[in-house]
């Protein structure tokens, strides 16, 4: 199976994380994190390739990754659901394999998979859990209407999680950074929602 990927990149926010891990001497830990994120994203890419979807790009994020598919209006609901779920499924498979890996790498590898799995299954956009929920609640309404509604919910949820982190997990700097980043992604998507709406209407008019 060939994966046709037009563009691959690592998000700039990953650079300080990589530098901190390298300076601290945790090269093996960094390799496991990056490898786990790439494995997770491969799950999405393989599923998209199976349905012969056009993959415009793939970006490795602090929480996993993000793939951009072309002509999403033409993609069947079932196919979008499988592609969204494929990342967590790949991570779950790696978690099961890690349980049978003896040695000092087992514990950190299991922890990394559990963390990636937990974060990605949260029902917040653009995490996999959020995308899955968004797909499941979509019906006869246009995609942009569902997306706009779900963005409102995601922004409120991110703010709530940030407040909880500050109150109950004040020392978890990475969690604060992560959800601030996710909140920023949601706000950025919200700002461009009118363009997304206009583009989808234009694409639907062409299809009809």
Image (cartoon, helix red, strand yellow):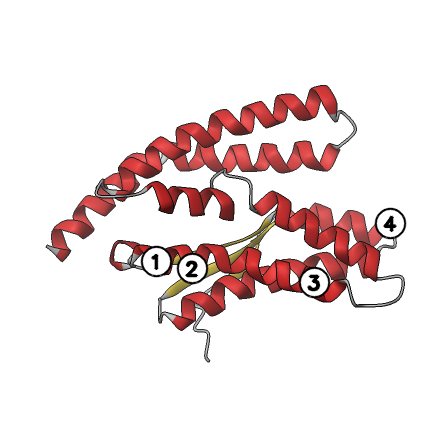
Q: Nearer the viewer, residue 166 or 197?
A: 166
The CA distance from mark 2 to mark 4 is 38 Å
Q: Are marks 3 and 1 in contact (CB under 8 Å)?
A: no
Looking at the image, the residue that sits furthest to the bottom is 1
x then y, percent, for residue 57: 45, 60
Q: Which residue is mark 3?
A: 96
The CA distance from mark 1 to mark 4 is 44 Å
Q: Nearer the viewer, residue 7 or 109?
A: 109
* Mark 1 / mark 4, whichever is N-terminal: 4
Q: Is residue 11 above or below residue 3?
A: above
Q: Is residue 169 above or below residue 114?
A: above
- Residue drawn at x 21%, y 43% is 140
Q: Are marks 1 and 2 in contact (CB under 8 Å)?
A: yes
* Mark 3 / mark 1, whichever is N-terminal: 1
- Residue drawn at x 82%, y 61% is 106
- In terms of image quadrants, where is residue 180? top right
The CA distance from mark 3 to mark 1 is 26 Å
Q: Which residue is mark 1?
A: 78
Q: Which residue is mark 2?
A: 82
* Mark 4 / mark 3, whichever is N-terminal: 4
Dot 4, how many residues are within 10 Å of its Cα: few (below 14), some (14-19), or many (20+)? few
79 with respect to 207 (left or right): right
Which quadrant holds the C terminus? bottom left
Q: Nearer the viewer, residue 111 or 21?
A: 111
* Helix, strand or loop status at disc 4: loop
Q: Are marks 4 and 3 in contact (CB under 8 Å)?
A: no
The CA distance from mark 3 to mark 2 is 20 Å
Dot 1, how many residues are within 10 Å of its Cα: few (below 14), some (14-19), or many (20+)? few
Residue 62 seen in this snapshot: no
Q: Which residue is mark 4?
A: 24
x then y, percent, for residue 203: 19, 52
* Helix, strand or loop status at disc 1: helix
């Amino acid at each position: 199976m060939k994966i046709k990927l037009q563009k691959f990149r690592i998000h700039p926010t990953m650079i300080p994380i990589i530098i901190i891990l390298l300076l601290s001497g945790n090269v093996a830990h960094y390799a496991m994190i990056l490898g786990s994120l790439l494995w997770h994203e491969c799950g999405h890419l393989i599923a998209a390739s199976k349905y012969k979807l056009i993959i415009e790009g793939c970006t490795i994020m602090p929480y996993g990754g993000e793939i951009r598919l072309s002509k999403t209006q033409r993609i069947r609901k079932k196919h979008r659901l499988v592609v969204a779920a494929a990342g967590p499924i790949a991570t779950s498979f790696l978690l099961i394999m890690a349980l049978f890996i003896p040695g000092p790498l087992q514990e950190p590898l299991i922890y990394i998979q559990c963390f990636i799995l937990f974060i990605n299954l949260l029902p917040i956009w653009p995490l996999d859990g959020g995308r899955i929920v968004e797909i499941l609640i979509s019906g006869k309404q246009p995609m942009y209407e569902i997306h706009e509604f779900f963005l409102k919910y995601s922004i409120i949820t991110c703010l709530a999680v940030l407040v909880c982190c500050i109150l109950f997990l004040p020392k978890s700097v990475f969690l604060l950074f992560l959800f601030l980043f996710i909140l920023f992604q949601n706000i950025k998507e919200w700002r461009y929602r009118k363009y997304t709406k206009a583009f989808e209407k234009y694409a639907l008019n062409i299809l009809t």
